[in-house]
Amino acid sequence: TLVLADHDAIAREVANRIDALIRERQAAGQRTVLGLATGSTPIGVYRELIRRHRDEGLSFRDVVTFNLDEYYPMAKDSIHSYHRYMWENLFAHIDIDPKNVHIPPGDIPREEVSEACAEYEAEIRRMGGIDFQLLGIGKTGHIGFNEPGSGADSRTRLVHLDNITRKDAAADFFGEENVPREAVTMGVATILDAKEIAILATGEHKAAIVRRAVEGEIDHAVAATFLQRHPATTFFVDEPAAADL
Ligand code: GLP
């Protein structure tokens, strides 16, 4: 666990690691596969990556991305979609090839979802697996949308959102009744397959769940506890989020 002063310090530190990884792999003629997250926590990391692209020659030409999750159902161009979030907060500002961007589908018919999830997993494997996975943490301890009850062997699938998660999203959706009830998310096993993981949490409202994730018993009531079994996971927290550790 790395405790840093604030959101900006975390953003710089994590962007620095991603920058170094991309350049190192580029020098070796290899692509970098990034697993990306949404929410307010990773915004600073994306801002810092955009700055490095603009000012320091960091190129994303050889970068392939897989996002963790998307609401279901959700149109790509909706202001609430994670597709739109990713394009607005990162992809539109860097030189990534749109063909290299992968985000779970929120806009396909229900009967096509399970096949699309299997294909998402297959594409991650074809790309050689995720080199670096960025994560936030929800109040229920979810990573991606792996709510309480998600097993260590879960894979990309359609899930029901927890009521706490829907309440947390209510303001963004102008009312809880507008928050989708389901989402498509990478599973816990998909996430744990990543070679390196950075999980970020800022603010006092995350202190209790950070403590549970870092120090609590490993158990499917809190999906983030499974990260304790991963050999290369770093928790990046600011002082308020680290208050209960
Ligand atoms: C959503 C996302 C998660 C994210 C969580 C926390 O539920 N699906 O991936 O970690 O929100 O969001 P925030 O970073 O805004 O606190």
Image (cartoon, rainbow, N blue to C red):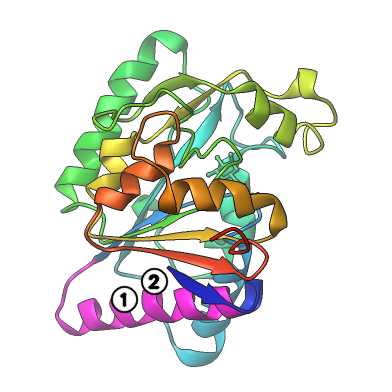
Residue 118 visible, this angle: yes
Q: Position of residue 194 (x, y in %)?
A: 25, 53
- Kindly tell me whether residue 39 is visible in this rendering: no
Secondary structure found at label 1: helix
Secondary structure beneath dot 2 equals loop
The quarter holding residue 44 reads bottom right
The picture quadrant for ligand 1 comes to top right
Q: Residue at x 63, y 79 (%)?
A: 5
Based on the picture, tell me whether residue 61 belongs to the magenta stretch.
Answer: no
Which residue is located at x 48 percent, y 79 percent? 13
Which three-letter amino acid code belongs to the residue tagged 1?
Ile
Q: Given the image, on which type of amino acid does mark 2 rest?
A: Phe
In front: 89, or 5?
A: 5
- N-term mark: 2 or 1: 1
Using a 10 Å C-alpha cutoff, classify the residue at mark 2 as few (fewer than 14 neighbours), some (14 to 19) or many (20 or more).
Answer: many
Label 1 near label 2: C-beta < 8 Å?
yes
Q: For the view shown, which residue lies furthest in the top direction?
A: 111
Residue 128 lies, in percent from the top left, at 15, 53
Where does residue 37 sit, x and y in percent of width and height?
49, 51
Circle 1 sits on which residue? Answer: 22
Q: Which residue is mark 2?
A: 60
Residue 1 falls left or right of residue 169:
left
Start-end of magenta stretch: 9-31
